[in-house]
Image (tube, coloured by chain):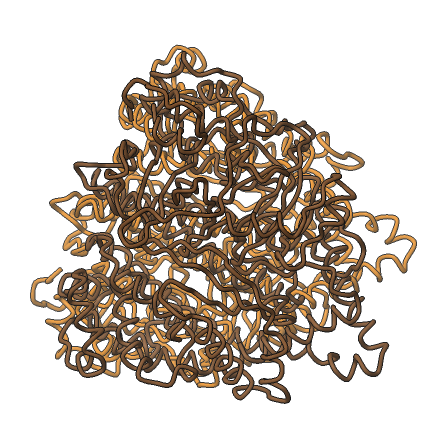
Chain colours: A orange, B brown
Amino acid sequence: MRHLAVVAALVGALPALADEGMWTYNNFPSAAVKSKYGFEPTPQWLDKVRLSSARLAGGCSASFVSANGLVMTNHHCTRGCIEQLSTAQKDYIANGFYAKTLADEIQCPAMEINQLAEITDVTDRLNTATQGRTGKEYSDTLKAEMSKIEKECATSDQVRCDVVTLYQGGKYNLYKYRRFQDVRLVFAPEHAIAFFGGDPDNFEFPRYDLDVSFVRVYQDGKSAPQNHYFKWSKSGVKEGDLTFISGHPGRTSRGLTIAELEYHRDVVLPKTLMFMSEMRGMITEFQKRGPEQKRISNNMLFGVENGVKAQKGRHEALLDKAFFAQKVAAEQELRQKVNASPELKQKYGAAWDEIAKAQEQLKNIRKDYTFIEKNAGFSSQMYSLAMALVRGAEELPKENGQRLREFADSNLPALKAQLFSPAPIYPELEIARLEFSLTKLREELGSDHPFVKKVLGKESPLTLATRVVNGSQLRDVKVRQQLFEGGKKAITESKDPMIALARLVEPDARAIRKNYDENIDSVIRKNSELVAKAKFDVYGTNVYPDATFSLRLSYGSVKGYTEDGKKVAPVTVMGGTFDRHTGEDPFALPKTWLDAKNKIKANTPMNFASTNDIIGGNSGSPVINKDAEIVGLVFDGNIQSLGGEFGFDESVNRAVSVHSEAISESLKTVYGATRLLEELRPTKAPTVKSPPAG
Amino acid sequence: MRHLAVVAALVGALPALADEGMWTYNNFPSAAVKSKYGFEPTPQWLDKVRLSSARLAGGCSASFVSANGLVMTNHHCTRGCIEQLSTAQKDYIANGFYAKTLADEIQCPAMEINQLAEITDVTDRLNTATQGRTGKEYSDTLKAEMSKIEKECATSDQVRCDVVTLYQGGKYNLYKYRRFQDVRLVFAPEHAIAFFGGDPDNFEFPRYDLDVSFVRVYQDGKSAPQNHYFKWSKSGVKEGDLTFISGHPGRTSRGLTIAELEYHRDVVLPKTLMFMSEMRGMITEFQKRGPEQKRISNNMLFGVENGVKAQKGRHEALLDKAFFAQKVAAEQELRQKVNASPELKQKYGAAWDEIAKAQEQLKNIRKDYTFIEKNAGFSSQMYSLAMALVRGAEELPKENGQRLREFADSNLPALKAQLFSPAPIYPELEIARLEFSLTKLREELGSDHPFVKKVLGKESPLTLATRVVNGSQLRDVKVRQQLFEGGKKAITESKDPMIALARLVEPDARAIRKNYDENIDSVIRKNSELVAKAKFDVYGTNVYPDATFSLRLSYGSVKGYTEDGKKVAPVTVMGGTFDRHTGEDPFALPKTWLDAKNKIKANTPMNFASTNDIIGGNSGSPVINKDAEIVGLVFDGNIQSLGGEFGFDESVNRAVSVHSEAISESLKTVYGATRLLEELRPTKAPTVKSPPAG
């Protein structure tokens, strides 16, 4: 079903008739939108929308919604913060949060918000630098030049600069962001309504969630004023209305070669799904240890369950024989066209086989790479901190361009934010996670693997995990600061057992990373760039690149679809939320909602589905109308949209959003959040209302 | 690597040069064994070996090893019994068990042992009965005729008769067993040595396990004398020696069509692996609730972990592109040969497409069938009992031939053994399992599925599971007996909540079963029979059928292999066991072993690998030499053997066994099990030894 659309977009300079595409702001198909919907976004319109959009560095999207730095995103995007601010006594996840005054807003321990200020094309500069180079030399040069560009751009801690690799290396753009690191929580509803229906309803539609939260960006201790922000629509949207979504889709893999897709289908996804499923079972049962254990592991469980469902959808898409056959046909067509021209053949002809060979090599080191270097064997926040400190001591004294990418100067603010976050770390959960992942390390690599023997020695995973977690001081931010500032000497002399574990792992991890970077990643990057350029040469550049967690704009309309032969209407109403209430988690509404039931207009729109092309990372994106007003808030896609990783099918792929009216109605009627509502929809004369309930 | 051998066997009347094959006793390739190994089993030899072999009805193999009814099998095959006999105070899993006298032997609550007395070919009778029939009529007739044959054969409770479908229906044989239902535990070592290395070492080699246990069959309260049993070899085996394995491989799928293999690869195995992995995580963490919870869930965890590893191996085999391509080529060759002959084409030509169509239909009902009818949504012993009672009340009043197969007269003793087993049932584990599976039911079918709504109503999975488990009286055998004897009326009037749940599910489950039996299973059976007959017509009958948990004989020799470029020697020694001891579970030896360390001859063989073709179900099989003496005890296969589900590769597939010398040496030196040892290896004059330590 989804097949035709994707092939057209992949191979074609054909006009994109479907609402497909996660378009960059510097290549937006305004003419196509006009021809289909009668509205043509101007450059000024695009600038305004871009500057009103925001990114949560942790992996979500957001938008500015007032002149006073108010930011709207999903509840599930600020959930980490809400959990970190909660204690067993003050549980904001369970009870929600509302700052009645500006002074009541509380700082999130580890949140960063970015606003995309400028896009510059740096393709030529990077191509010139890497010209004629291959292998290690190619990737070293590319990395060094990227770091150089980013450093030149990042003139202060309030600026973040990322060179974004688009079209698998067909283009490189420099994205310059304004960075906000003081972010404070303003409003969050109860988890029970934010994630009403829980995992069973996740990625499903019809839907009834109030997955919203508000935060505010601060600078120098004061709310940071904004020239650009989205106004609140007076009426929201209805079926058939044109919708734009501006956000940060995290990753798609629509441009991958068949060899890469097969590797995903036959190796990565089955292994990941098993690993995550087992972890899911473990955490679900861990929650039964007690209410406090439930509270501290909720966010992690949500992440794992969400991930399982998303990966399962991707896997099923790749297992769809007809879908895969079309992917194969598209690649064959492109390769035939390349091979038909001696010039193209000479430039690009070998690229696919080179990628396939690198994939074969990757298979051989996959386990070591995943479990030792990518930390699948050491699932622990404290271990990640320890490894960042150990590696940082080694990397930071080097020349900027010589460092591993994550230690480049442009990444330092993010690294420091991670290292010095005061977010609480829970030893009991740390031990459970670390024991689990060490057990998987031993299982996947085998008890007789030299690395496994070196790490475990005579200890069991539980003994080791308990010793290094309980013996470590790394939960203390000050200790981390001392180790960071003390550099190599402090790290070498540290008796902290978690640091010692990271020190033990580091040489093995580094050797695997080096092999991966030099012999696999660089080959895939180089040849993917060639495949992308072959596509440009054969089909033109009127295409969108795969998602890269950089700002994109998609267009579409509010529209239902057909599932199992039945029509699914595109808009649900608030009354339906109460019909779905059973009283048992995850279908138990919070008391505030039950109390407000009779005051809520039952036919107020709750959630809606639209044809916009989105993917994970778009969570928290504003849905806007042609007047750039907020009409909704993306929080999910339907189950069919999960295959969007590999291709888009307009007939069933749907973005799922909270309707703007559901947000304002609940702020008013359920939560009495007068101050917030007034900021979102200013009225001429200030009104006096009853005190807030939240 | 494994590909050539399997294709040869699948398609070929070529002599089986490799040690491949799980041969039936009435079609054993004695001549091939002679030409390769110089020894030709005679019909008398085969009869003796057959009658000395045994089956545990629960899913393992075994052997008679004394004239007095002593039976040897694996520890992991009697583990359920050992756990059932244990309490928090007397933990035989942890501490082992040894009956110093005959009177100390304890009856296993739910164990049945079968001895294959006779094989009769009933193919013609069944073919005559089903001649010209298709669909529901075909499967009803087949089922009715099978039940009739079995009933005619099963003249008492001490006889069990199964019509075994061989070659996917190419042949039907009636297997008549002598049945023993009074089985008592004689000896079991500590779990720590029986399963030394635990899950990390499971399906690995080199290996160091004493996975052995002894039970005894009783009749009328006395040990049941045996005319046929295996004697103990004086010296065991060494590298290169010829070995036979007589046992009950559970299932292989080497004869499946490509459509069926694809369904396994792309649907069944990925889904099963996710389900089981999550359950594994859940039970692993459940064990942390406390020592008693650990004890009562150990057996279940072992089953799940073992299953995960086995299924993972199968999945990887099917994902091997070269392997799968050869399967495809073999099917194409057969179909071409069939289509080349007008007569064969007319008889068999459509069979493959008919199976493929049925597989497509199965995809559509898979979730309902698996979760509602096959109980994946109701993982609970008490639920299984309730459903057997509810269905039994419906089925048993019917004519024998009209009943669902599992309620046929021939199955009644097994049904009653299950229903009235005094094995303990643990409510806490029942609730955890049932909550888990109800959650998966809701997840897979969706919260809005009418069946899910009907079952859950306003309850959460936990609320429902807790209510039906805690409110049920079914843990009491007497209550089950009353309900069974009370028939339909007792079931209808029962207020037991677990019975009520089964009553609620039954009509839906029955409807799905009917659809499956009539429109899918019967089509696949009928057409698989045609494919099998096509193979006979094209390639002859000198082939072995897929495994069906019926007695088979395989031959081979003690032989190492090469893994990751390194030679793996085929025999480990007892000294190596001590080298592998770390002191931490699962690498912690029990105290008895540590105490005996200096008395054990370090170079005594411990475990060995041989080229025999085996699969799950062969656990507990005797390994014998040409003199039909015990030289070992199968307990595992190496990781490469897991692909044996779909094909055999002699270069790396290995059966893994405990060496007979390791068993006798540890009985003597570690456990002082004089009485048992004397029974296994009678000496002329009785000797007096120090009292047993175990």
**What residue is drawn where x is 69% and y is 64%?**
A327
Give the left or right position of residue A139, taking residue B330 as reference.
Answer: left
Nearest to the observer: residue B341 or residue A606: B341
Give the left or right position of residue B279, taking residue B127 as reference.
Answer: left
**What residue is drawn where x is 41% and y is 32%?**
A384
Q: Quadrant of the N terminus of chain B?
A: top right
Q: Is residue B213 above or below residue B595?
A: below
Residue B225 in the image: x percent, y percent?
Answer: 39, 47
Is residue A157 at least partly visible in the picture?
no
Residue A348 in the image: x percent, y percent?
Answer: 82, 50
Nearest to the observer: residue B624 or residue A257: B624
Give the left or right position of residue B381, taking residue B588 as reference.
Answer: left
Is residue B594 at least partly visible in the picture?
yes
Q: Is residue B81 above or below residue A561?
A: above
Residue B250 in the image: x percent, y percent?
Answer: 52, 56
- The quadrant in which residue A74 appears is bottom left
Residue furthest to the front in view is B685
- The quadrant in which residue B243 appears is top right
Nearest to the observer: residue B406 or residue B126: B126
Residue B653 in the image: x percent, y percent?
Answer: 64, 42
